Amino acid sequence: MARRKRFIIEDILEAAFQIVRKSGIKNLTARAIAQELKSSTMPIYTCVKSMREVEESVVKRAWLVLQDYQGKSWTGDAYIDMGLGYVLFSKEEKFLFKCIHDESYEEINTRYSERNIKINLEKLDNNPMFKNLSKDIAEKVLFHGFLFSHGFASLLNSGMSLNVRSLGSEKSIIELFKEASEFSWNGLKSVIE
């Protein structure tokens, strides 16, 4: 009598995602997944073609988590909320943030990054700040906002800057981000006008 399959691919991918979320993609191995599932490695190798397939699935899911963060209303201003969501994602999901910037997954990260930009631009269609901007200028503004957000997020994620590291609460991060965004936007407006 054949032994019944105990795990399905979704179980394995969920376990992999939780491992990466807790300890990073460098710690994602078949053995680690087996430990998470309280199993041997055999079911993993019968369900997936390769560990690379599992890793790529985790990276794609990390992008979806980022998208959720950027879709939340933190301040009520969609433009600021996107950048703030990116920053808070880097703080609260340190290892997922690192996944979406890992050069080992360059093709996936490039494709999902472009998709993310398109989604974010669509969200800004009704934003008063973007209403009268051409598509080219709107993309440029979004890109400049990303440069600022990425710098902030990277400092927060790495813990290298004392000024950023001292921002312990979500509220203090939101306040600093709003203030810096206002400075940035006022400077950008003077160039656009």
Image (spheres, helix red, strand yellow):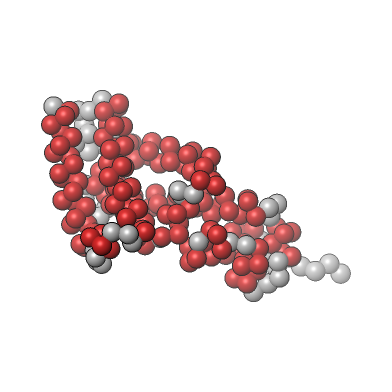
- Answer left or right for 101 relative to 58: left
Estimate the x, y position of residue 11 in percent, counting from the top left: 61, 63
Front residue of this view, candidates 7 and 181:
181
Estimate the x, y position of residue 155 in percent, counting from the top left: 32, 55
Relative to 23, does residue 176 appear above or below in the rendering?
A: above
Q: In which quarter of the image is residue 121?
A: top left
Q: In which quarter of the image is residue 184?
A: top left
Q: Quadrant of residue 95?
A: bottom left
Give the residue at the far bottom of this rendering. 38
- Which residue is located at x 49 percent, y 38 percent? 111
Estimate the x, y position of residue 125 in percent, counting from the top left: 27, 35
Relative to 162, does residue 72 appear above or below in the rendering?
A: above
Front residue of this view, candidates 111 and 122:
111
- Quadrant where the C terminus sits is top left
Estimate the x, y position of residue 23 in percent, counting from the top left: 50, 65
On the question of residue 97 being in view, the answer is yes
On the question of residue 18 being in view, the answer is no
